[in-house]
Amino acid sequence: MYGILFDANLCIGCGSCVEACKEENKLPASKSDVLSATDYTIVQEVGDQYLRRMCMHCLEPSCASACPVGALHKTPEGPVVYEYERCIGCRYCMVACPFGVPRYEWASVTPRVRKCQLCAHRLKEGRPTACAEVCPAEATMFGKRPDLLALAWKRIAADPEHYAQRVYGTQEAGGTSVLIIGPQEIMAAFDARIPMESLPHKTWVVLSQIPSAVAAAGAGLLAVNWIIRRRMALAQNGKLNGTDEQKGAES
């Protein structure tokens, strides 16, 4: 299984990875501080360091487990890919992702869920991801996940003063195909609420209740609607009766 290793201590913030991603995926040229339907990866400033944000390509992706039609799935090579033809637009994947990655094309008449695909098409051809290929500082490295983990710990051991003793993505959400190393400042930028276990089983427990919840909510709304209409009808009848009584008195 392949993945990428991002080393915040080596990143110079040039944005070559962002430009390569846009070119490879035929996305419009733009600059953004947040992930979007047209920005699969971004480079954020964290103090005097830089941090890449993108899909983490979980080993057991909760987005895939949440999708009722299999529009998202993990490939043997490592990427978590999306198939528009299968998608029904439920957007459960957006709710399920612990990293808040998937984005939706709200302005499109044929909207899709958009995110980094880890250049799945390039991996099938035996090529590295576009972002890793263009990185001039080797801050983004492509390779097999076990080799990247070994490289990450080697860099940490060689310079313990400038690296946190941690490889982000080793266990987070059950492990990811995107690994990140850097100083403690970078590690502190991640959401501390993300558990050190895979999430698909939890996602299913929650999402399996959605049909029941929707049915209950629908029944409740129908009841409220009936009550409101009933009161309106009674009020209208009362007004009509009052008018008839008034006409009878006048005559």
Image (tube, rainbow, N blue to C red):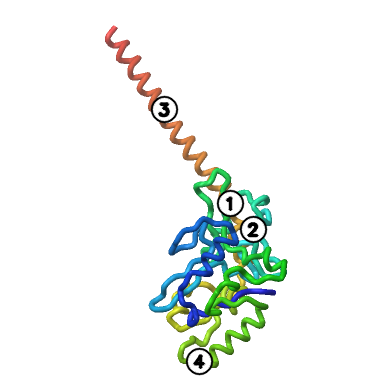
Q: Which of marks 4 and 3 is nearer the N terminus?
A: 4
Amino acid carrying label 2: it is Tyr
Q: Which of marks 2 and 4 is nearer the N terminus?
A: 2
SS class, disc 3: helix
Apparent side of residue 90 relative to residue 70 in the rendered image (left or right) = left
- In this rendering, which labeled residue sits more in front, label 3 or label 2? 2
Disc 3 + disc 1, Cβ < 8 Å: no
Mark 1 — residue?
A: 112
- Marks 3 and 1, Cα distance to the nearest angstrom? 47 Å
- Marks 4 and 1, Cα distance to the nearest angstrom? 43 Å
Residue 174 in sight in this render:
no
SS class, disc 2: strand
Q: Residue 82 carries which label?
A: 2
- Residue 224 higher or lower than 157, as above or below: above
- Residue in the image at 49% along x and 87% along y: 163
Residue 80 in sight in this render:
yes
Nearer to us in this view, 130 or 236: 130
Disc 2 + disc 1, Cβ < 8 Å: yes
Toward which corner of the image does residue 65 lie, by quadrant?
A: bottom right
Q: Which of marks 2 and 1 is nearer the N terminus?
A: 2
Mark 4 — residue?
A: 159
Counting from the top left corner in percent of width and height, residue 181 is at: 52, 81
Mark 3 — residue?
A: 234
- In this rendering, which labeled residue sits more in front, label 4 or label 1? 4
Q: Earlier in the sequence, mark 3 or mark 2?
A: 2
